Amino acid sequence: MEANTRSTGRLPAAFLTPGSSSFMDFLGAHSPGLLPGNRPLPPVQGAIEAPHGTTIVAASFPGGVVLAGDRRATMGNVIAQRDIEKVFPADEYSAVGIAGTAGLAVEMVKLFQLELEHFEKVEGAQLSLEGKANRLSTMIRGNLGMAMQGLAVVPLFAGWDVDRQKGRIFSYDVTGGRSEEHGFAATGSGSVFARGALKKLYRDDFTENQAATAVVQALYDAADDDSATGGPDLARRIYPIVTVITEDGFRKLTEAEVSEIVRAIHERRLDQPDGPRAALL
């Protein structure tokens, strides 16, 4: 950017010149070193030990979509944190859940939130849900250098599409490849178990409460088989983060609401530890 302009009290010309509505493009043009993907990577030998977060699940219902995540972060075979939050609002009508290297993932979410806010201020309108999903894809691709050193970020993105009037879910791979998921999705180390649970539980006529219950059931099953996924901790009152996005916008369920769902599931699992049984036909 231009030389210090504090003495004149004026902003640098870069801030006053019309340009791209993308904050990432603006930063790349004027201070590229601030972008995470442009930072020089030191030589590394062996794996880098850093806290990793898993598992994220999502399920749609006729009125919107539910996005939820467990609370555990691990570092190798050690539990690094028991109450980490992995699901965040991206803007008023969308949310992102993070899996992978926790520090880089949280930084990416903050930059993504700023990207969407910047676009809205410059253009005077919100980016479409499809556009938001594409912007996140570009940001994940920018982290590829770190991912190749074992510090990957693989989020799950969900939101309310104001044009199509329905909830939608998008998953990503480590290179930024984007796929729209239909009905339900999961990412993170426990995703294979969570997805298996949702495959048997999911119905396209879910109510909001049923969708929330289904994703918590899926997190229970993931925690049952994946040591990196933390199940609800009733003793410490640590429950999954559960969010809902509808035509009214983003809403995070209160601790009391999630506690009610968790305790109902827990009571049933005292008789059926493996969870609800699906019909054969």
Image (cartoon, rainbow, N blue to C red):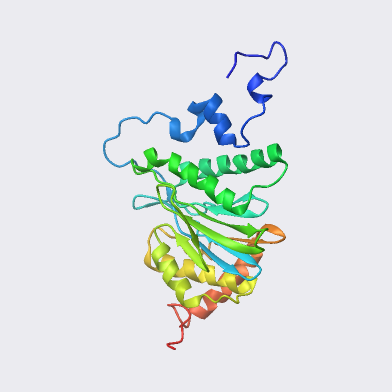
Identify the image quadrant of the N terminus: top right
Vertically, is 20 above or below 16? below
Residue 77 visible within the image: yes
**Residue 230 visible, this angle:** no
Closer to the camera, 19 or 97?
A: 19
Name the residue located 52 percent from the left edge and 30 percent from the top edge. 28
Q: Examine the rendered structure and indicate whether residue 14 appears above or below residue 51.
A: above
| x 57%, y 61%: residue | 168
Q: Looking at the image, which is closer to me, 127 or 4? A: 127
95 displayed left or right of 147: right
Quarter in which the C terminus is drawn:
bottom left
The residue under the point 57% across, 43% down is 112
In the rendered image, the residue lying farthest to the bottom is 281
Where residue 162 appears, x then y in whole percent?
Answer: 68, 58
Q: Position of residue 273 (x, y in %)?
A: 44, 78
Along the line of sight, the residue nearer the viewer: 46 or 137: 137
The number of numbered badges drawn on the structure is 0
Q: Is residue 52 left or right of residue 124?
A: left
The spot of residue 136 in percent (x, y) is: 52, 46
